[in-house]
Image (cartoon, helix red, strand yellow):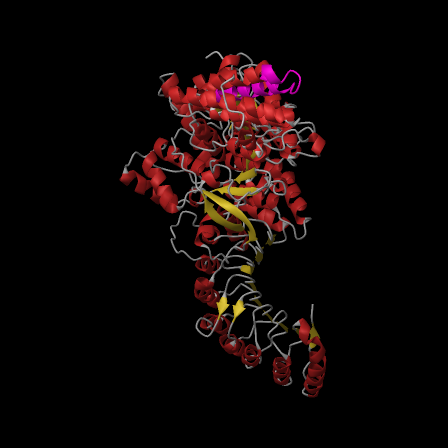
Amino acid sequence: MKLTDEQLNTAIKEPDLPELAACFDNTDDYLEKLELSPGQKTDVSEVKAKTRLNRTQAGIKLALEYWQNKNQLQATFQALLLIILSLLKGDVAVQVCKYLSDKYSTTSCPHSQERVLLNHKLSSYRDYLQSRYREPDSTSATQWPPVSTNKVFKLAMIQKEKIQRGKIDDEFVKLTITGKIDDILLKKTPVNLTNIFSEIGDRRHFVLIEGAPGSGKSTLALHICQEWAKGKLFQEFDIAILVRLRDPLVREAITISDLLPCTNKAMANEIETAIMSLYGKGVLWVLDGWDELSSDLPRDSIINKLIRPGTSQERPLHKSTMIITSRPSSSAELHPLVSSRVEVLGFNPHELEQYFTECLKGDSQAVQTLLERIRENPVVEGSCYLPLNASIVVNCFLSDNHSLPTSNHGIFTSIVQSSLKRYLQEKLGKTTPVGDITSPDSLPSEIRMQTVQMCQLAYHGIEKNKATFTDSDLAALCITKDISNVGLLQTVPSIISDGHLVYYCFLHLSIQELLAAIHISLMSPKQQISVFQKLFGNPRFSAVFQFYAGITKLSTSRPILSKLPRFLCPVPATVFDLVRKVVKTEKEKYGEPKPLLLSLINCLYEAKDSRLCVFVANLLNHNLNLNHTTMNPIDCLSVGYFASVCSNSSNGFTLSLKNCSISEQGCKFLARGLSKCPNSNNDIPTGGIHIAEIIENTSSISGLNLPFNAIGNSGLSTLCEALSTNTSLKTLNLRNCSLTISDDNGAALYQLLNTNNSLEYLSLNGNTVTSCRHIAAGLAVNKTLRTLDLECCELTDQSIEELSTGLINKIKRLYIWGNSSITEDGMKTLARHLTTHCSELTLLLIPDHLISCSKTVFRDANEERKRNGLPEINVYVY
């Protein structure tokens, strides 16, 4: 449609001018409303569209004349052009804008025509992105893992209020806590994807989406852009730009154009100009994989400017909206910057069964068989809640005659073998057995070279701390491009495709770590130890070393040493120094987490070498202290195995697990490891019962420290029953284990104190003790307990009176600090009783508020004790 002056000079009566102009008095407010979806298409008929066009043209002309008289044309012209784009369709809107720009902007508004053209370019770019996101994801022909999944995302909005394991009342929050290192111990509420921006308000729109590796964060990031392209999600944004932060080109990106998916660089530069002119408004950035971004990102990187806007002079994109994904253990530095946090949740048991039913095409018998195999296998059971891991398990189940590996190393080895087998059958038409991937000579000739090169590439990635590889990386290592055909490498399109598609290769991190471990295991023993010494500070050292332990069993390949009897060389010379270095490094940490030591224990479980376990126990002085080290269920299994081997081959072994965030499933696996029955089936649902198994199945463990772990009230009776017959345990620390000692359930503690003949230290610190009647009855007959810790147990004067009746044994230390309900009367009752009882009591720790009165009370009591031939009691507060 051609537009002329005659069409624009539609007759409107002069009196209408003030009324029409008044409509634009609040242009800014009107613009904010209309600009929510600029350029939207309508279903208006052609006749109505022409009528609207004529009225709009006339109205705009008169409004412009009115505002020009007020010398406010510059401030309003841009708003009017955007209104046109909102009201009219495509080419018609552009023609009207261009006409008005030509007519009015020459002298009064020189930048308006440029702004109109920029908006038109953004509209065209929107069409380009929508077309691109609607295309199937461009990866290698063979997907990894090769199991389809439904795109169903369960999300939780993360609140700021902290929670403690074992003290979670909210059932929804309980389902989100799995005992893994990536658990987020904060209050949460369910949220739909469409509502993740709803609680932000006026703050900068910056949403952090967190989830454990394999929870589906990358799939969600792509899904958001695909749904936006279909018009189903986040239509308030003009454009949505997906940036995979693992892309090698991201690290080098300096400008916005370096991040934009475009057909060529010229197009990217034009779109950058348009985005910058709007300060990023209307743009949704979806940045996937903060945890995969290089840690040494340059200061001038555009990613830094996007995430940290900086000063006002450096804020070209401060109006943009951002979604960024990361695993929780890598996202702490983002927390102060984001406006809200969302967690991607894994499967619950019912959803896992539904997922398996989908993958196994409704074969209910196969589904039940798979679930039985999982329950028999603690390694698999502890990781199946994650969609990626669940898909791996299904693949192993299908490709390995309905059996599952029993170790982490075995699971990923099975995946590699399955991919090689599929390549042989589908690409080469061969039915040759794959062989052992850890021994290249046993592989068929058709895949031998590709496998060796894949291992070489993986080791290069570990060495350089990278997961993606370009053609130049492959060329530098003299690796042929056809290694991607075997299905382990994903070929992913990069950001800029200047006239042609550019790809990079991505190797899944766990697969990369396994293949790197294979590459190292093929070196000479001297080279092996040299490599690990060099990788010692590498963030992925632990994972590679664990796979290495599974492959080599930490045994030496030196010809001379391998011929020596094991009693002469109990520790392989290739790992001796490395193990000692790990232990020494971790022993020097006081009150800090010890993840490297925990990783070593996992390696010992993979190797199943009892002699090496004993060697490590000797280095640790028979005291495994993992306090404050977060332990997932698989960690618990490994620690249980290690403690079982060491406690049964030494005179005593102490295990300290204070504040390790051990879940109920972790307790179960710890019990399995200690009983050396990792394949036993135990469906008892209470953590305390699994701790009881630990005690029953361990003959010489001397200390068990389990503060801040979810033992729970329901497991207390079973725990005490197990302890009543134990003859080795001397120390039991149950601080803050969610226990309640009352008249109704306190009989379990009486049984423990009445029958146990070894326990010397018992801490119930931080639990709730509403009655001391049963504790006192047990103390009255117990002959071994020397220290009783009842700090912060909500004791009252009545509790003290009950407790006093049992203080007739040889207890030496009594701690009742932190019980604010005890009064001076309670202290007098206790002092009166102690004048003639507790012949060995020398230390009493009392509440702070009672120190003044207690000095007088216990001065008199100590004088009476002295006359009765009893030692003085030292009374203290913290």
- Residue 181 in the image: above or below residue 36: below
Is most of the magenta stretch helix, strand or loop? helix
Instruction: Quadrant for residue 292, please give it.
Output: top right
Between 698 and 514, the one nearer to me in the picture? 514
Residue 526 relative to residue 189: left or right: right
722 in magenta: no
Q: Position of residue 141 (x, y in %)?
A: 42, 20
What residue span does the magenta drawing correspond to?
Answer: 101-128
Instruction: Quadrant for residue 117, please give it.
Output: top right
Q: Is residue 107 visible?
A: yes
Residue 155 relative to residue 821: left or right: left
123 in magenta: yes
Q: Position of residue 747 (x, y in %)?
A: 45, 73
- Residue 862 in the image: above or below residue 295: below
Residue 505 relative to residue 296: left or right: left
Residue 714 relative to residue 258: left or right: left
Between 374 and 289, the one nearer to me in the picture? 289
